[in-house]
Amino acid sequence: MNLSPEETSTWIPLTLQNRDESVLQIQSASKEFLYDKSGKEYIDGISSWWTCIHGHRHPEIMEAIRQQTGVLDHVMLAGFLHDPAELLSKKILSLSGGNYKKVFYSDNGSNAVEIALKFAIQYYKNRDGEKSGRHRSKFIVFSSSYHGDSIGGMNVSGITYFNRIFAELRFPVYEIGAPDRFQFSTKEETSIHYTNLLSQVKEAISENQDEYAGIVIEPLVFGASGMIFYDPEFLQGLRKIATELDVLLIFDEVFTGMGRTGEYFAFQKADAVPDLIAFAKGLTGGSLPLAATLVSEKIYHTFLTDDPYKSFFHAHTMTGNPIACSAGLASLAVLEKEGLDQVRKLESDFRKRIQGLVSSHPEVLINPRVLGGICAFELNQTIGEDEYLNPIGKKLRAKLLEKHILLRPLGNTVYITPPYNISESSLDRIFSALDQAIGSL
Ligand SMILES: Cc1ncc(COP(=O)(O)O)c(C=O)c1O
Protein backbone atom coordinates (compact mmCIF):
# COMPACT_ATOMS: atom_id res chain seq x y z
CA MET A 1 0.00 0.00 0.00
CA ASN A 2 1.29 3.44 -0.89
CA LEU A 3 1.11 6.35 1.55
CA SER A 4 1.41 10.07 0.96
CA PRO A 5 4.31 11.83 2.77
CA GLU A 6 1.71 13.70 4.81
CA GLU A 7 0.44 10.46 6.31
CA THR A 8 3.80 9.18 7.56
CA SER A 9 5.45 10.03 10.88
CA THR A 10 8.82 9.76 9.19
CA TRP A 11 9.95 12.77 7.16
CA ILE A 12 10.42 11.38 3.66
CA PRO A 13 13.45 13.15 2.17
CA LEU A 14 13.64 14.74 -1.28
CA THR A 15 9.88 14.34 -1.62
CA LEU A 16 7.29 17.07 -1.78
CA GLN A 17 5.24 16.97 1.40
CA ASN A 18 1.88 16.77 -0.30
CA ARG A 19 -0.85 14.31 -1.12
CA ASP A 20 0.14 13.86 -4.76
CA GLU A 21 3.41 12.20 -3.84
CA SER A 22 3.45 8.56 -3.00
CA VAL A 23 5.68 6.53 -0.70
CA LEU A 24 6.21 2.85 -1.41
CA GLN A 25 6.58 0.73 1.72
CA ILE A 26 9.37 -1.81 1.37
CA GLN A 27 9.29 -4.93 3.48
CA SER A 28 12.32 -6.94 2.42
CA ALA A 29 15.14 -7.24 -0.08
CA SER A 30 17.41 -9.80 -1.69
CA LYS A 31 20.03 -9.50 -4.47
CA GLU A 32 18.88 -6.74 -6.86
CA PHE A 33 15.28 -6.99 -5.70
CA LEU A 34 13.14 -5.02 -3.26
CA TYR A 35 9.76 -6.38 -2.10
CA ASP A 36 6.87 -4.26 -0.93
CA LYS A 37 4.36 -5.13 1.79
CA SER A 38 2.15 -7.02 -0.61
CA GLY A 39 5.11 -9.07 -1.85
CA LYS A 40 5.49 -7.24 -5.20
CA GLU A 41 9.04 -7.34 -6.55
CA TYR A 42 10.96 -4.28 -7.80
CA ILE A 43 14.39 -4.21 -9.42
CA ASP A 44 16.66 -1.78 -7.60
CA GLY A 45 18.32 -0.26 -10.65
CA ILE A 46 20.29 2.30 -8.63
CA SER A 47 21.55 0.04 -5.80
CA SER A 48 19.59 2.12 -3.29
CA TRP A 49 21.49 5.34 -3.91
CA TRP A 50 24.60 3.48 -5.08
CA THR A 51 25.26 1.61 -1.85
CA CYS A 52 24.26 -2.06 -2.36
CA ILE A 53 27.06 -2.76 -4.81
CA HIS A 54 26.83 -6.55 -4.34
CA GLY A 55 23.03 -6.61 -4.14
CA HIS A 56 20.87 -6.51 -1.02
CA ARG A 57 21.72 -8.69 1.97
CA HIS A 58 24.80 -10.26 0.43
CA PRO A 59 25.28 -13.49 2.44
CA GLU A 60 28.97 -12.87 3.22
CA ILE A 61 28.28 -9.35 4.51
CA MET A 62 25.29 -10.52 6.57
CA GLU A 63 27.40 -13.32 8.07
CA ALA A 64 30.22 -10.90 8.96
CA ILE A 65 27.69 -8.67 10.75
CA ARG A 66 26.22 -11.64 12.62
CA GLN A 67 29.66 -12.77 13.76
CA GLN A 68 30.71 -9.30 14.89
CA THR A 69 27.51 -8.77 16.91
CA GLY A 70 28.55 -11.80 18.98
CA VAL A 71 31.89 -10.18 19.89
CA LEU A 72 31.93 -6.38 20.11
CA ASP A 73 29.17 -3.89 19.31
CA HIS A 74 30.86 -0.54 19.79
CA VAL A 75 33.66 1.28 21.49
CA MET A 76 34.72 4.85 20.91
CA LEU A 77 37.89 5.21 18.89
CA ALA A 78 39.40 8.06 20.93
CA GLY A 79 42.17 6.18 22.71
CA PHE A 80 40.87 2.75 21.65
CA LEU A 81 41.20 0.47 18.67
CA HIS A 82 39.72 -2.86 17.56
CA ASP A 83 40.51 -5.41 14.89
CA PRO A 84 37.67 -4.60 12.48
CA ALA A 85 38.73 -0.92 12.17
CA GLU A 86 42.45 -1.68 11.93
CA LEU A 87 42.05 -4.56 9.48
CA LEU A 88 39.73 -2.50 7.31
CA SER A 89 42.17 0.43 7.33
CA LYS A 90 45.02 -1.84 6.27
CA LYS A 91 42.90 -3.29 3.48
CA ILE A 92 41.80 0.15 2.22
CA LEU A 93 45.37 1.47 2.30
CA SER A 94 46.55 -1.50 0.30
CA LEU A 95 43.72 -1.25 -2.27
CA SER A 96 44.52 2.42 -2.75
CA GLY A 97 48.00 1.43 -3.90
CA GLY A 98 50.05 2.58 -0.93
CA ASN A 99 49.39 6.25 -1.73
CA TYR A 100 47.87 7.04 1.67
CA LYS A 101 49.04 6.82 5.23
CA LYS A 102 45.86 6.84 7.35
CA VAL A 103 42.12 6.16 7.18
CA PHE A 104 39.84 8.50 9.15
CA TYR A 105 36.35 7.02 9.71
CA SER A 106 32.99 8.76 9.80
CA ASP A 107 29.50 7.64 8.85
CA ASN A 108 28.31 9.41 5.72
CA GLY A 109 29.65 10.93 2.56
CA SER A 110 29.02 14.55 3.54
CA ASN A 111 31.04 14.12 6.72
CA ALA A 112 33.85 12.38 4.88
CA VAL A 113 34.05 15.43 2.59
CA GLU A 114 33.95 17.90 5.48
CA ILE A 115 36.73 16.00 7.21
CA ALA A 116 38.85 16.28 4.06
CA LEU A 117 38.21 20.05 3.99
CA LYS A 118 39.22 20.40 7.64
CA PHE A 119 42.37 18.34 7.09
CA ALA A 120 43.29 20.59 4.16
CA ILE A 121 42.83 23.80 6.15
CA GLN A 122 44.68 22.49 9.17
CA TYR A 123 47.49 21.04 7.06
CA TYR A 124 48.57 24.57 6.13
CA LYS A 125 48.13 25.84 9.69
CA ASN A 126 50.24 22.97 11.03
CA ARG A 127 52.82 23.24 8.31
CA ASP A 128 53.28 26.99 8.08
CA GLY A 129 52.12 28.16 11.51
CA GLU A 130 52.03 31.89 11.95
CA LYS A 131 54.37 32.49 9.05
CA SER A 132 51.59 31.58 6.69
CA GLY A 133 50.18 35.06 7.26
CA ARG A 134 46.72 34.51 5.91
CA HIS A 135 44.47 31.71 6.87
CA ARG A 136 44.24 29.32 3.93
CA SER A 137 40.61 28.27 3.83
CA LYS A 138 39.41 28.86 0.29
CA PHE A 139 38.65 26.07 -2.17
CA ILE A 140 38.32 25.79 -5.92
CA VAL A 141 35.00 24.07 -6.61
CA PHE A 142 33.05 23.20 -9.76
CA SER A 143 29.62 24.15 -11.05
CA SER A 144 27.14 21.30 -11.01
CA SER A 145 29.19 19.27 -8.55
CA TYR A 146 27.59 17.69 -5.50
CA HIS A 147 29.38 16.97 -2.24
CA GLY A 148 26.56 16.45 0.24
CA ASP A 149 23.78 18.21 2.09
CA SER A 150 25.61 19.23 5.28
CA ILE A 151 26.67 22.89 5.41
CA GLY A 152 30.28 22.13 4.46
CA GLY A 153 29.29 19.66 1.76
CA MET A 154 26.84 22.15 0.24
CA ASN A 155 29.48 24.82 0.47
CA VAL A 156 31.88 23.12 -1.90
CA SER A 157 29.12 21.96 -4.25
CA GLY A 158 28.15 24.02 -7.26
CA ILE A 159 25.21 26.30 -6.61
CA THR A 160 22.21 24.31 -7.75
CA TYR A 161 18.56 23.91 -7.04
CA PHE A 162 19.55 21.85 -3.98
CA ASN A 163 21.50 24.47 -2.09
CA ARG A 164 20.56 27.84 -3.60
CA ILE A 165 18.47 28.68 -0.55
CA PHE A 166 21.51 28.40 1.73
CA ALA A 167 23.94 30.24 -0.53
CA GLU A 168 24.44 33.01 2.03
CA LEU A 169 26.09 30.55 4.40
CA ARG A 170 28.90 29.95 1.97
CA PHE A 171 32.49 30.21 3.15
CA PRO A 172 34.86 31.41 0.43
CA VAL A 173 35.07 29.26 -2.67
CA TYR A 174 35.88 30.03 -6.28
CA GLU A 175 33.53 28.27 -8.68
CA ILE A 176 34.79 27.06 -12.05
CA GLY A 177 32.59 25.68 -14.85
CA ALA A 178 32.00 21.93 -15.08
CA PRO A 179 34.37 19.98 -17.37
CA ASP A 180 31.40 18.35 -19.13
CA ARG A 181 32.50 16.13 -22.03
CA PHE A 182 29.09 16.35 -23.69
CA GLN A 183 28.99 20.10 -23.95
CA PHE A 184 31.02 19.89 -27.17
CA SER A 185 30.79 17.65 -30.20
CA THR A 186 34.49 17.03 -30.94
CA LYS A 187 37.41 15.84 -28.88
CA GLU A 188 39.38 18.95 -29.88
CA GLU A 189 36.67 21.31 -28.63
CA THR A 190 36.45 19.37 -25.38
CA SER A 191 40.20 19.55 -24.95
CA ILE A 192 40.14 23.32 -25.48
CA HIS A 193 37.34 23.56 -22.92
CA TYR A 194 39.45 21.64 -20.39
CA THR A 195 42.46 23.84 -21.11
CA ASN A 196 40.37 26.99 -20.56
CA LEU A 197 39.00 25.71 -17.28
CA LEU A 198 42.46 24.67 -16.09
CA SER A 199 43.77 28.14 -16.95
CA GLN A 200 41.00 29.66 -14.85
CA VAL A 201 41.92 27.39 -11.93
CA LYS A 202 45.58 28.33 -12.28
CA GLU A 203 44.85 32.03 -12.55
CA ALA A 204 42.49 32.07 -9.56
CA ILE A 205 44.99 30.31 -7.32
CA SER A 206 48.02 32.24 -8.60
CA GLU A 207 46.34 35.55 -7.82
CA ASN A 208 45.72 34.64 -4.19
CA GLN A 209 47.88 31.63 -3.51
CA ASP A 210 48.06 32.25 0.23
CA GLU A 211 44.26 32.00 0.51
CA TYR A 212 43.75 28.59 -1.10
CA ALA A 213 43.75 25.29 0.76
CA GLY A 214 42.57 23.02 -2.03
CA ILE A 215 40.68 21.96 -5.13
CA VAL A 216 37.65 19.74 -4.54
CA ILE A 217 36.23 17.57 -7.30
CA GLU A 218 34.28 14.37 -8.00
CA PRO A 219 36.69 12.40 -10.21
CA LEU A 220 35.55 11.38 -13.73
CA VAL A 221 31.81 11.70 -13.00
CA PHE A 222 29.79 14.43 -11.31
CA GLY A 223 27.12 12.05 -10.03
CA ALA A 224 24.08 13.49 -8.30
CA SER A 225 23.95 16.63 -10.40
CA GLY A 226 23.41 14.76 -13.66
CA MET A 227 26.04 12.05 -14.29
CA ILE A 228 28.36 14.52 -15.99
CA PHE A 229 31.28 12.56 -17.48
CA TYR A 230 34.72 14.01 -18.17
CA ASP A 231 38.18 12.75 -19.05
CA PRO A 232 41.22 11.79 -16.99
CA GLU A 233 43.30 14.51 -18.69
CA PHE A 234 41.37 17.13 -16.74
CA LEU A 235 42.23 15.51 -13.41
CA GLN A 236 45.84 15.12 -14.48
CA GLY A 237 45.85 18.85 -15.29
CA LEU A 238 44.46 19.65 -11.83
CA ARG A 239 47.08 17.42 -10.20
CA LYS A 240 49.82 19.35 -12.02
CA ILE A 241 48.43 22.74 -10.96
CA ALA A 242 47.94 21.63 -7.35
CA THR A 243 51.54 20.45 -7.14
CA GLU A 244 52.97 23.53 -8.87
CA LEU A 245 50.98 26.04 -6.83
CA ASP A 246 51.10 24.15 -3.53
CA VAL A 247 47.41 23.54 -2.89
CA LEU A 248 45.86 20.21 -1.98
CA LEU A 249 43.87 18.11 -4.41
CA ILE A 250 40.80 16.51 -2.85
CA PHE A 251 38.76 13.84 -4.61
CA ASP A 252 35.22 13.15 -3.50
CA GLU A 253 34.87 9.44 -4.33
CA VAL A 254 31.69 9.00 -2.32
CA PHE A 255 30.00 7.80 -5.52
CA THR A 256 32.94 6.63 -7.65
CA GLY A 257 34.84 4.73 -4.94
CA MET A 258 34.50 0.99 -4.28
CA GLY A 259 34.58 -0.10 -7.89
CA ARG A 260 31.83 1.91 -9.56
CA THR A 261 34.10 3.07 -12.44
CA GLY A 262 35.82 -0.31 -12.83
CA GLU A 263 38.78 0.29 -10.47
CA TYR A 264 38.68 0.39 -6.67
CA PHE A 265 38.91 4.16 -6.88
CA ALA A 266 38.37 6.49 -9.84
CA PHE A 267 41.74 8.13 -9.17
CA GLN A 268 43.34 4.85 -10.24
CA LYS A 269 41.40 4.92 -13.49
CA ALA A 270 42.30 8.58 -14.03
CA ASP A 271 45.96 8.16 -13.14
CA ALA A 272 45.94 11.26 -10.94
CA VAL A 273 46.64 10.79 -7.24
CA PRO A 274 44.92 13.29 -4.91
CA ASP A 275 46.16 14.30 -1.45
CA LEU A 276 42.87 13.44 0.26
CA ILE A 277 39.98 11.16 -0.72
CA ALA A 278 36.50 11.03 0.79
CA PHE A 279 34.42 7.94 0.17
CA ALA A 280 31.35 6.16 1.57
CA LYS A 281 28.35 4.69 -0.34
CA GLY A 282 29.50 1.15 -1.32
CA LEU A 283 31.95 0.73 1.55
CA THR A 284 29.73 -1.68 3.51
CA GLY A 285 27.81 -2.89 0.47
CA GLY A 286 24.80 -0.86 1.63
CA SER A 287 24.44 -2.69 4.93
CA LEU A 288 25.52 -0.09 7.51
CA PRO A 289 26.57 3.57 7.52
CA LEU A 290 30.33 3.98 7.19
CA ALA A 291 32.50 6.53 5.45
CA ALA A 292 36.20 7.28 5.35
CA THR A 293 38.71 9.96 4.45
CA LEU A 294 42.14 8.91 3.19
CA VAL A 295 45.05 11.06 4.29
CA SER A 296 48.40 11.16 2.49
CA GLU A 297 51.77 10.92 4.22
CA LYS A 298 52.55 14.56 3.40
CA ILE A 299 49.50 15.74 5.33
CA TYR A 300 49.81 13.24 8.14
CA HIS A 301 53.39 14.29 8.72
CA THR A 302 52.29 17.78 9.85
CA PHE A 303 50.10 16.23 12.56
CA LEU A 304 53.00 14.21 14.02
CA THR A 305 53.84 16.58 16.82
CA ASP A 306 53.75 17.06 20.60
CA ASP A 307 51.86 20.32 20.16
CA PRO A 308 48.22 19.68 21.25
CA TYR A 309 47.06 22.61 19.13
CA LYS A 310 48.18 20.71 16.07
CA SER A 311 46.05 17.63 16.70
CA PHE A 312 42.97 17.03 14.61
CA PHE A 313 40.01 17.91 16.81
CA HIS A 314 37.35 15.95 15.00
CA ALA A 315 35.43 12.80 15.89
CA HIS A 316 31.97 11.37 15.48
CA THR A 317 30.38 9.28 18.20
CA MET A 318 30.02 6.16 16.06
CA THR A 319 33.38 6.61 14.31
CA GLY A 320 34.81 3.27 13.17
CA ASN A 321 31.93 1.23 14.56
CA PRO A 322 33.14 -2.42 14.73
CA ILE A 323 30.01 -3.92 13.15
CA ALA A 324 30.12 -1.46 10.26
CA CYS A 325 33.87 -2.07 9.81
CA SER A 326 33.29 -5.83 9.74
CA ALA A 327 30.64 -5.31 7.07
CA GLY A 328 33.19 -3.16 5.18
CA LEU A 329 35.80 -5.90 5.34
CA ALA A 330 33.35 -8.46 4.01
CA SER A 331 32.19 -6.13 1.23
CA LEU A 332 35.78 -5.44 0.16
CA ALA A 333 36.52 -9.17 0.15
CA VAL A 334 33.60 -9.68 -2.27
CA LEU A 335 34.80 -6.74 -4.36
CA GLU A 336 38.32 -8.22 -4.56
CA LYS A 337 37.07 -11.72 -5.33
CA GLU A 338 34.59 -10.94 -8.08
CA GLY A 339 33.29 -7.36 -7.89
CA LEU A 340 35.63 -5.59 -10.32
CA ASP A 341 35.20 -8.34 -12.94
CA GLN A 342 31.46 -7.95 -12.58
CA VAL A 343 31.72 -4.18 -13.13
CA ARG A 344 33.75 -4.73 -16.29
CA LYS A 345 31.20 -7.20 -17.60
CA LEU A 346 28.38 -4.81 -16.70
CA GLU A 347 30.18 -2.04 -18.60
CA SER A 348 30.28 -4.09 -21.80
CA ASP A 349 26.65 -5.18 -21.31
CA PHE A 350 25.64 -1.54 -20.90
CA ARG A 351 27.47 -0.54 -24.09
CA LYS A 352 25.53 -3.09 -26.14
CA ARG A 353 22.16 -2.41 -24.55
CA ILE A 354 22.30 1.38 -24.67
CA GLN A 355 22.92 1.23 -28.43
CA GLY A 356 19.69 -0.73 -28.84
CA LEU A 357 17.78 1.84 -26.80
CA VAL A 358 19.25 4.74 -28.80
CA SER A 359 18.23 3.12 -32.09
CA SER A 360 14.66 2.70 -30.82
CA HIS A 361 14.44 6.35 -29.72
CA PRO A 362 16.98 8.27 -31.82
CA GLU A 363 15.15 11.60 -31.49
CA VAL A 364 14.56 11.41 -27.77
CA LEU A 365 17.61 9.79 -26.28
CA ILE A 366 20.80 11.86 -26.36
CA ASN A 367 24.32 11.71 -24.90
CA PRO A 368 24.33 7.98 -24.16
CA ARG A 369 27.34 7.21 -21.98
CA VAL A 370 28.80 4.34 -20.03
CA LEU A 371 31.60 4.10 -17.49
CA GLY A 372 32.03 0.96 -15.41
CA GLY A 373 28.75 0.29 -13.64
CA ILE A 374 27.19 3.60 -14.72
CA CYS A 375 24.96 4.00 -17.76
CA ALA A 376 23.33 7.38 -18.39
CA PHE A 377 21.62 9.45 -21.06
CA GLU A 378 19.47 12.54 -21.41
CA LEU A 379 15.89 12.75 -22.62
CA ASN A 380 15.75 15.39 -25.27
CA GLN A 381 12.37 16.58 -24.07
CA THR A 382 12.44 19.43 -21.67
CA ILE A 383 8.99 20.12 -20.39
CA GLY A 384 9.37 23.05 -18.07
CA GLU A 385 12.36 23.60 -15.85
CA ASP A 386 15.91 22.40 -16.24
CA GLU A 387 17.91 20.51 -13.68
CA TYR A 388 16.59 18.17 -11.10
CA LEU A 389 13.09 19.61 -11.13
CA ASN A 390 12.37 18.89 -14.75
CA PRO A 391 9.05 17.00 -14.45
CA ILE A 392 10.00 14.54 -17.16
CA GLY A 393 12.16 12.71 -14.63
CA LYS A 394 9.34 12.23 -12.20
CA LYS A 395 7.01 11.14 -14.97
CA LEU A 396 9.46 8.51 -16.19
CA ARG A 397 10.13 7.34 -12.65
CA ALA A 398 6.40 6.75 -12.09
CA LYS A 399 6.03 4.87 -15.39
CA LEU A 400 8.99 2.64 -14.52
CA LEU A 401 7.69 1.95 -11.04
CA GLU A 402 4.45 0.72 -12.61
CA LYS A 403 6.69 -1.79 -14.39
CA HIS A 404 8.38 -2.63 -11.10
CA ILE A 405 11.66 -0.95 -11.92
CA LEU A 406 13.24 1.51 -9.49
CA LEU A 407 15.22 4.22 -11.26
CA ARG A 408 15.46 7.81 -10.09
CA PRO A 409 16.13 10.17 -13.00
CA LEU A 410 17.78 13.48 -12.17
CA GLY A 411 15.49 15.80 -14.12
CA ASN A 412 15.89 14.75 -17.76
CA THR A 413 19.05 12.73 -17.00
CA VAL A 414 18.29 9.03 -16.71
CA TYR A 415 20.87 6.71 -15.20
CA ILE A 416 21.24 3.08 -14.21
CA THR A 417 23.69 2.10 -11.45
CA PRO A 418 22.63 -1.39 -10.41
CA PRO A 419 24.44 -3.82 -8.12
CA TYR A 420 27.57 -5.08 -9.90
CA ASN A 421 26.23 -8.65 -9.91
CA ILE A 422 22.80 -7.85 -11.39
CA SER A 423 21.50 -10.73 -13.52
CA GLU A 424 21.13 -10.56 -17.31
CA SER A 425 17.39 -11.13 -16.94
CA SER A 426 17.02 -8.12 -14.64
CA LEU A 427 19.02 -5.97 -17.06
CA ASP A 428 16.69 -7.19 -19.82
CA ARG A 429 13.72 -6.11 -17.73
CA ILE A 430 15.21 -2.65 -17.01
CA PHE A 431 16.01 -1.92 -20.65
CA SER A 432 12.71 -3.25 -21.93
CA ALA A 433 10.82 -1.15 -19.34
CA LEU A 434 12.85 1.91 -20.36
CA ASP A 435 12.09 1.24 -24.02
CA GLN A 436 8.35 1.11 -23.35
CA ALA A 437 8.26 3.95 -20.84
CA ILE A 438 10.26 6.33 -23.07
CA GLY A 439 8.02 5.38 -25.99
CA SER A 440 4.94 6.35 -24.00
CA LEU A 441 6.17 9.70 -22.65
C1 LIG B 1 29.87 12.67 -4.71
C2 LIG B 1 29.07 12.72 -3.44
N1 LIG B 1 29.58 13.33 -2.36
C3 LIG B 1 28.91 13.38 -1.19
C4 LIG B 1 27.67 12.82 -1.07
C5 LIG B 1 26.93 12.87 0.23
O1 LIG B 1 26.93 11.62 0.81
P1 LIG B 1 25.88 11.30 1.99
O2 LIG B 1 24.54 11.34 1.35
O3 LIG B 1 26.28 9.94 2.46
O4 LIG B 1 26.07 12.35 3.03
C6 LIG B 1 27.09 12.19 -2.17
C7 LIG B 1 25.75 11.60 -2.09
O5 LIG B 1 25.12 11.27 -3.06
C8 LIG B 1 27.81 12.13 -3.39
O6 LIG B 1 27.31 11.54 -4.48
Image (cartoon, rainbow, N blue to C red):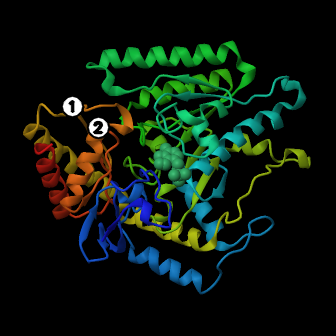
Amino acid at the residue labelled 1? Asn
Question: Which percent across, then down, holds residue 92?
Answer: 56, 57
Pointer 1 and pointer 2: residues touching (CB < 8 Å)? yes
The one nearer the camera, 203 or 188, is 203
Q: Mark 1 points at which residue?
A: 380
Looking at the picture, which amino acid does disc 2 mark?
A: Asn
Q: Where is residue 232 in the image (x, y as percent from the top left)?
A: 42, 31
Coordinates of residue 127 in the picture (x, y in percent): 81, 34
Relative side of 122 to 162, left or right: right
Q: Is residue 151 above or below residue 284?
A: above
- The answer to which of marks 1 and 2 sits earlier in the sequence is 1
Residue 369: % across, % down: 26, 38
Q: Which mark is residue 180?
A: none
| Residue 336 shows in the view | no
> Residue at coordinates 55% horizontally, 63% vertically from top-left?
289
Q: Give the class, few, some or many, for how many residues have Cα within 10 Å of label 2's Cα (few <14, many ≥20).
A: many
| Residue occupying the point 56% across, 35% down | 165
- Per the image, the residue denoted by label 2 is 412
- Element type where label 1 sits in the image: loop
Residue 417 seen in this snapshot: yes
Q: Ligand 1 within 8 A of label 2's CB?
A: no
Which of the 4 quarters of the picture holds residue 402? Answer: bottom left
